[in-house]
Image (spheres, grey):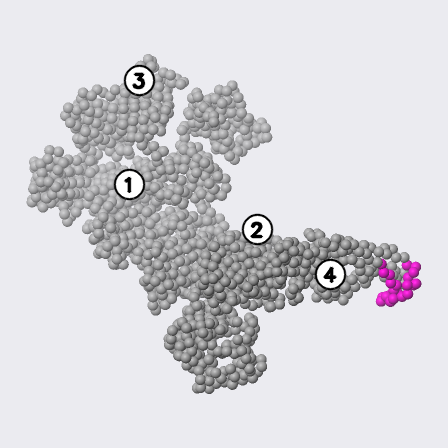
Amino acid sequence: MGRVSSLVEYCLLSILIVYSLKVGIVQGQTHQWITTYTPCSKPCGGGIQTLVKECFTVEFEPKPAFKQYCQGLVVIQPLTKACNTQSCELCERTLTTLSGIVTSPYYPEKFTLPRYCAVHIELPEANRRVVLAFSEFSLDGLELEQGLTAEDVCICGTICLLHDPNFDKIREELCGTKPPFVWVSQSNQLDVEFITERHDIFNRFHANYTAITTSASGCTQFIDTEVDGPNGFLTSLNFPNHYENNLHCEYIIQADPVHRLILFVESFQLEPGNPKTNCNTDHLKISDLYTWRNDVYCGTQHSFAWVSDSNGVWLVFHTNHEFVYEGFLIAYEVIDRDYYPLVFTTFPGEFQTPGYPWAYPAFTKFEYLIHAKPSEVVVITFNDFHLEAAHTTEEEEIALCEKLGFVENDTLDTCLEMIENGDLCGRSRSCYIPCTEETAQDFIEILDVYYSEISMYCGYLPTFSWVSKGNEVLLRFYSDENEDFKGFSASYRAIERRPPSEWELVFRAASGRERNAASKWLDESRGYNEGAKAAKSVTVGSLQTYKNRIVNEWENIGVRKVKIELYKSGNVLSAFIFEGIESSNLTDWFECENLIYAPYSNLYNCTDLVFKIDEEGFEIANELGSNGDNCTDADGLVWLDLQDVPDGSYTTCSYENAAATTTRFFYSTLPEGTPTNTGTGMEYADVFTIWIQRDCDQHLIMNPSEPKFVESEDYGFANYPHFEYCDMYFTTDPLQHITFNFKDFIMQTDCELQRDYVVIEDVTSEYSDLFCGKQSDVEWTTTANNAILRFRTDASINYAGFQAEVVALSRNTEDCSSLLRSSFGNLTNLDYPDSPQYIRPQGCSTLVHAPPADRVVFSFNKFSFDFDIGPEFVIVDNFGNDLLVPLSGHLYPFSWTSASNELALWYYPQPYKSYLIYRSSYRRLVQPLPAGCLEFYDAEFSGFFDWPLLAMPTGSQNCFTIIRTHPVLNRRVTVTFSNLVLQLQECDAYLQVQDSTTSRNDKYCTTAQVSFTWTSDTNEAIIKFYHGPLPALHQVEAEYRSLQRVDPQWYQVFTEDSGHFWSPNYPNLYPNDIPVAEYLFHANAFQLVLIVFTDFGVEGPDVNGTCRNDYVRLYDLLDQRKDNYCNDQPPFGWCSSGNEALVSLIVDKTAQKRGFYANYAFLPRPDPAACGGLFNSDSGEFSSPNYPRAYGNNQLCVYVFQVSSDKRITLQFDQLVTQPDVKCEKDHLEVQDKITGRKNVYCGTVGVPLTWTSQGNVIVMTFISDLTDSAYSGFTGSYTISDREDTQTCIEEFMAQSGTIKSPRFPSDYYNNANCRYEITVDEGFAIQLTFVEFNLEPVNPTTTSCDFDYVEILDGNDVSQDKLCGSRGPFERRIISNKVTLIFSSDFISFYKGFVVNYEQVSLTTPPPSCDQVFTGTSGVFTSPNYPGNYPDNTECRIEINVADTLRVKITFTDFSLEGYPNCPYDYVKVTDIEEGIMEKYCGRIDGPIEWRSESHNVLVLFHSDDRTPSSGFTAIYETEPIPVGALSLSGCESGSLVETSAQFGQLISPNYPRPYSLNQNCLVRITLRPDKACLITFTEFALEAHPKCAYDYVELTSFPDGASERFCGTPFVPFTWRSTGNICEVHFNSDAFVPSQGYRGSFEAVEAVGRITVAPTTEAPTASECNQELSHKSGTFTTPNYPAKYPLNAKCSTRIRVPEGFLIQVTFRQFDVEDEPNCNWDYVEIVDNGAGGVKTKRFCGNFQQSFTHTSLSNDIEVKLVSDNYESKTGYFASYKAVSNIVNIG
C-alpha cells in the first residue's frame, strides 16, 4: 500500500536479520557451509527467495573461510523458493463503508502466512470518527532471539499497529492477548497494520468498526488515559457556572485495552426531564463504545458511579433552547480488568458462580457488574454460599472446635480431622473463619464503586446480604486449584435512597470593608447574619458576612460534601469541593485527601499541599508557596488565598499588597496555579463562600456485642424537626444478626396517612414494619446481617422522637432455627413427633416477630422434656420480668405472652441425654393502645388490680392485663371481679377475659353489681379493657389467685346453660391411676350453677368418717366454699353462690367404684339486694318482695334452697296471693324439686297453710310478676328439713299437648331402687298416643316369664293397667283412649340398664289408628311394619313418605329387619327411593345389625310390600335429617393463606384441588370451634395420600383441644372411617412435601354430643372377613388372608367368594400385598376367578407390592384364591371390594 511506517520497516528488517543468520548448515571435518535465503522479492502476490552460501571454519567460534575449502561439501537445499504467495488484496485494503470487519489473514485460523498486512479505513464523511471494536485479539509475539529483549517483543514481534494518519501522535502498538476492547480515531481515517515474524504460532484478531458523529460545534474532548494520565475531570461548559443553550458536546475517554473506566459523577444538575422518555430536555448520555450499553441522565442526581464494560466511553451532552443549570462534574479513573464482565442492569435478578450448583472450576477469575440508577443502591443476597474456607493455623482450628463444643480429647481430634477434610463447615455454618488477603484461598471481592470500599467473603456462610452505598457494584470471584466447592447463588435488587441534598450556604464574606473573614469562620461562639443569604447578589463595598450557627456543631449535622466558591459579578470564578468527614475541627475538612475537585490540572492527584486556616487567612498552596513572608521561591505555587489584614499589616507577596487594608479573596487563573514569587495570574474575587451538602443518613458497621444508640435529631432536648428524611443502614458480618431495642418511641399517630413514621426493613428477607404514634417495648430482629431504618416526618405536628439500642448478636444458623413473622402458625421440636435425633452445636431457636404494636403468644398443647445433664428449654422474653423462662418436665398445655413484640424459644438437643417433644402454636395479641397499657401479674402470689388509668383519658383504647403462673407449676388462674361499672351502653365499652391456650372467652358489656369469677383452663388469662369511643369513668375491682390443675385428659369445661357429665368410664368402674378428674362449670355473671347427681357411688369415708380416700369435691369459686362427698349417695343437688363451680373427683390407688352421673343447669342468681336468695341453713323464712305490701310489677325472684345430701326440704306457705289467672301465665310462683323434676305452679289465692315437700335436697322457687296488675301481697312462708328416704323417687306431671319422658339419667343407665311416676294429662275429649323411641330394661323373670324386676307399667285415666313392659325392643307405639295416663317406672336393687325414651302426643278420639300409609315432615321419626313386633299381614302394601325441608336430606336406620328372603327380593320387600334423585335400594330377608340408607334430597318414599304367604316380624326404622352436604362449607384450609377457621356445625373437608391431585408443598389448616358441649365427628369417604410408616411425608393430622390429642393418617386406609374429638375445638392439618402428589381426600365434619375421651374408629361397611374359606355378599367390604397381619398358614388353599347384586361388577383393591415371591409365581400366589364370566382367571400375583392395585371383574361373582406351599409364608394381603356399575359411558 506504500505507507509502511518506520516502525514496520524497522521490525521487518530485524526479522530478516534474525532469520538470515542461520538457515542451514552443511558441515565437513574442518569447514562448513552456512546457508541463508534472501528476503522475498515481493510482500504479496508471489515472490522468490534465493539461496546464499558462505564458508566458515568448524570450531567453537566459526570464522569466515575461502569458498574453496567448502567445495567438497554438497548442499541439497534448492537454489530458489516461492514466498508470499497470498493475494495482495488479503492484506492491502482500503475500506470506505460506515461499518465493516477487520481481521487477521485467514481468520479464524490461528496462523498467518504473510509477515505484513495493512488496512486503511477512510469514512466518506469528514465529521465522523472510527470506532474499532476488537472482539478477539491474541498475538503470541516474537520468540526472544539474539539482540532482542523482552521489551522488543511487542515492538518487533507479532504486532498490530493502530494509527490515525491525520494525528501523528494518535497511535497504538498492540501485541499479546487482550480482552475485548475498542480504539477510537480522532478523524475519519484509521490505519491498521499487522506484522508477524512466523506463521506457525497463534496469531489472530477480529474487529468490527463503526462510525460515530463528531460534534459540529467544536464542543468536543478526546482523552487518551495513556497520554493524558489515568485520572482526571470532565465538566460541562462553564462549570460550575450555568452551561449554555443549544449545546451538543462530546467526550471520548479511551484507556489501555487491559483497563476499564470508572466515571465518578460528583455533581449533576441539568434541566428536569422524564427519564422514561430518554430525558427529552437537557441530558447527558453515557455509552460504552464496545457493548454500546448506555444510560441517559437529566434533572438533579445523586453522586454516582458508572463503570464501563470495556476500555472506551463516549459521553454526549445535549441542551435545548430553554433553561440552563449548573451542569455536571465527572471524575474518571482507570482500573484493571481481566475480561468482559457479566453486566446486570435490570432488577431484580440472579447470578451464580460458573457451574453452580456443581463445583466451580479451578483458577477462575470472574466479574459481575451490577448497575442501578443514581437514585438507588444495590442489595445483594447470597442465598447459598459455599467457597473454600480461609487458611487457618492450628491454634485457630483448636479455638474454633472449642467454640463449637468439641472440648473433650476424642471429640476435639474428630473436629480437627473434619476441618482437615473440609467436612466441618458442611455441618455447621457457625465455623466461619474470617477472610483476609493473607488467608483467603477462594473468595469474592465486592467493590462499592463510587465509595471505593471493598468487602471480602469466603468459606461456608448462611444466607446473608450486602448493601452498597452507591449505585454500582463490581463483584470479583477468584478460585485456586481446588475444585471441591459448590460456589454461590445470589439475587440482587435495587432500593431507593433519599433524594439528593441541596447545597446549603453556611459562610459568605464580601470584600471591601471586611477585615476578619477567617476569624469569623473559626469563631465557635456564634453565627453571623450581616447581610442577605444570596451569595451571588452580594457586591463589594459593604459589610456582608453570613455564618450559619450550625457550623459550630459541624460533627453532628451529617455533612457529606463541602464546597468553596469565589464569585465576581454573580459568576463563579473558582471552586474547590471536599468530601465530608466526621471531625469537630473545622480545619480538618480542608485536607488534601478529602479534595474531590479543583479546576487545576496539577491538583487531580492531590499531594503535598498545604491547607492553612488561621486568624490571618485561608490558603491553599504547596509547601514552598505557603512560607508566610517568603514569596521569592520560584517553585512556590498558590491556588487560593483568603487574606485577612490583622493590625493593618501585609505580607511581602506582591499580589497581597491589595489586602493591605481590607480582606481580599485571591485565586489563580493559571491551569497549574500561580507562582508566589511573581503573582502572575493571581486575581481576586468579590465574594468568598463555603457551602455544604448534608443529610441525616448513617451507615453503621455493627461489631458483635458492641451496641450503638441511634435516635431522632434533637432527641432528649427538643422535638424532632419537620421534613426529616433519614435512612440509617446497619450492617454486620454474615454470622451476626441485628436487634433493635427501642427504649422510647413517640411520634405523630395515624400510620395509614404516613405522616411521621419509622420503617425498619430486614434487607435479606425484604420484610418491613411501619410504625408511628407511641410505642412501648419494641424489639426488632433481622434474619441476617443487614437492616435499614427509615425515618420520615412531614410539616405538621412533631414529637420527642425515638431512641434505640442496636446490637449485633450471633446468628443461630442451625437447620432447626428460624425467625417467623406470620400472624399465626405451629411450632414443634426437631424430628417431631420423635425426640431430636442429632445434636446441634448452637442449639435450636425459634423467634416469632409481630408488628411493633402487637405481642406474641406461645400456646403449647404438648410439652415433655426430661434431661440428665445440660441446659434447659427456655422461652426468651427480652422485655419481660422473666427474661428467661426455663421449662422442663411433663407440662400441661400452657401459654406465654410476650412483654414486647418478639418472643423466642431455645433448646439444646442432646440425643441419648435428654428426651424432648413439644408442639406449640403461636399467634399475635392485638396491640395495646396506648402502647404502655399492658400489665403482667404472677398469680402464684395473689393480688389485686383495677381498671387501667391509662385507658381513661381519650377513649377507644385497648388495655391488657395478663395474669399467669409459671408453666412448670401446672396451675390455673382465677379472677374475682367486683363492682364492675361500665358507663357506655351497647358494648361501646367492655371487659373481655380469655384463656390464652384454649381461647375460651367472655365479654362483659353491662354493669355487674354482683361479684363474679372467671377461671382459666390453663396457666394464663388475658383481660382486655376496651374503654370505648368516648371519655368515661369505668371501674372494676379484681382479685386474682391460682389453683392447681389436673391432667387435661381428665378435665372438661361446661359453658352451655345445661347438660350432663359423668365420672371416667361411667357406669363402669372409674380408673384408680388418675389422681384427679375435674369439671369446670362457667356461667355468666348473673347466673349460679346447679348440679344434680342422679347416681353417686365412690369409695366410702375413713374410720373417722372423713372423705379422704376417693371423694368428690364441689368448689364454689366465688365464696371458696368446698364440700366433699363420698360413699353411695341418693340423688342430690348442690348450688354455687356465684357463677362458677369446680367439681373434682379425687381418687387414690386402691378401691374402684362406679362413680357418678350428674346433670347441671345455670340458673338466675338470686339478688339479695332485691329479692330471692340462697338458703342453706336447716330452717328459715322467705317472702315475696315488699311483703306484706304489694310485690310490684316486673319482678323476677329466685329462691334456692339447698341442704345436705341426706335431707329433704319442706316448704310451708302461710299466705300465697297473686294476680288471678286461670293458666298461671301472668303473676305466678313456680316450685320445683331439682332432684326429681317435680314442679308446681301457683297463682291467684291459694289455700293456706300449703305444704310442699321435696324428694331431694334442692328446691328452686321462682316468682314472676308481669307489667299488669300487681296490687297483691304475694307470699310468705318458712322451710324446714328432714331425713330423706332411701328409695330413688321421681314424680313428674306433664300437662302439655305433647312431650318427651326419659328414664332417670338417660342415656346413661338408670339407678337401682327407682320408683318413678309420670302423670300425663291432655285436654278432655282427646286420647294419648305413646311412642317408645328407645326401650331397654332388665329382661323378664325367666321363672315366671313376667316383668318382675325392672318395668314400665301403663295406667289409664282410671289407674287401670294397660300394659306392663320390660326387656329390650325396638320402637313401638301405644294408644290410650283417655286424656290421662300414668307411667310407673320401677327398678330393683340389682341390675340396671339404659332405660327408655317415650314421646307422647294428644290425638283425637275419632282419629282411627295409624294407617299403613304415613307421611312424615318432621326432622325425625319412627315407623314400623304393621303389627310390629308381631308378624305383618299378608298382601299388604304400605307407603311411608318422608318430605322434609329442602335444605335437609334423610338418613334411615332399620334397627330390626326380618322379611321373607329370596334373591332379587321378588316377594316380600322394602324398597327405599330418593324421589328427586331416582336413587333406589331394595331389601328383603333377615339382616343382622342396623341398615343405614341416606338420600341425596329431601323427599323419600319407603314402600313395604308383602305377598300372600310367609309373613315375618317385619321391621322397625328410625329416620333423622341432616344438612345436605352440597350446600355446606367445603374447606381445605388453604383458601386464605394457610388457616381457615369456622364455627359451622357441619361441612365438607377436601384436599386442595380435589378431586384433582393436590399440589406439592401444601400446608393447610382448618380449625373448627363448636359449642363447649359438642365434639367434632369427622368422616372421610375418600382418602389417598402418599404412604409412609410414620406418615412423615404427606399426611392429615387431626387434633383435639384443649388436651392436644392428635392422630395422623396417610396412605390409602379403607374408607369410610371416622374420628371424634374430645373437646369442642379440633384442627384438620394437611401437609404435603416436595415429592409424590396423590389424589387427596374428601370428608365431612359435624357437631355431635361430647362423650368423653378421643376415639378413633375407622369403620367398614361390613366386618373384615379373614377366614380361609368365606363368602361375602355385601355391596362393599374388606377381607384378608388368614391370620393377617401375621403370616398366612403353609399348604393353604383358601377361597374368598364375593357376590353382589346383578347389574354390578366387583372392584377389588389390594391395599397391602406380601406373598412369597417367585418369578413365575409357582410357590405361593393369589389369583382371581371370574365365576360369572365362565371361570376366566387372572394372572397369578406374588411378591411384595409397595403400591395398592385394583382389579375389576367381568361379572357379579368372583373368587379370590390363595395357594401356599410348605415352605415360607408372608403376611398376605389386605383387600377391599365394592360393587360398581356395569354401565360404561361412551363419549
Q: Which mark is residue 1437?
A: 3
Instruction: Indicate the amino acid at tag 1.
Output: Glu
Q: Where does residue 1300 sit, x and y in percent of width and height?
A: 23, 31
Query: Which numbered marker is on residue 1116?
Result: none
* N-term-proximal mark, 4 vs 1: 4
Q: Is residue 651 above or below residue 463?
A: below
CA–CA distance in space, label 4 to label 1: 128 Å
Q: Report which residue position mark 2 lands on.
A: 356
Q: Residue at x 47, y 54 (%)?
A: 276
How far from the left and from the top, in percent, is residue 1100? 27, 41
First of labels 3, 1 by sequence position: 1
Q: Nearer the viewer, mark 3 or mark 1?
A: 3
Q: Nearer the viewer, mark 3 or mark 4?
A: 4
Element class at badge 4? loop
Is 1737 left, or right, of 43 in this rendering?
left
**Residue 1374 is a magenta residue:** no
Q: Which residue is mark 4?
A: 2
Q: Which element is circle 3 on?
A: strand
Q: Quickly name the residue at label 1.
A: 1099
Residue at coordinates 68% horizontally, 61% vertically from top-left?
Answer: 161
Q: Residues within 10 Å of mark 1 (few under 14, many from 20)?
A: many
Q: Which residues are magenta?
A: 51-73
Q: Residue 1307 location in percent, x, y?
A: 28, 33
| Amino acid under disc 3 | Glu
Q: Nearer the viewer, mark 4 or mark 2?
A: 4
Which of the two discs, 1 and 2, labels the residue nearer the N terminus?
2
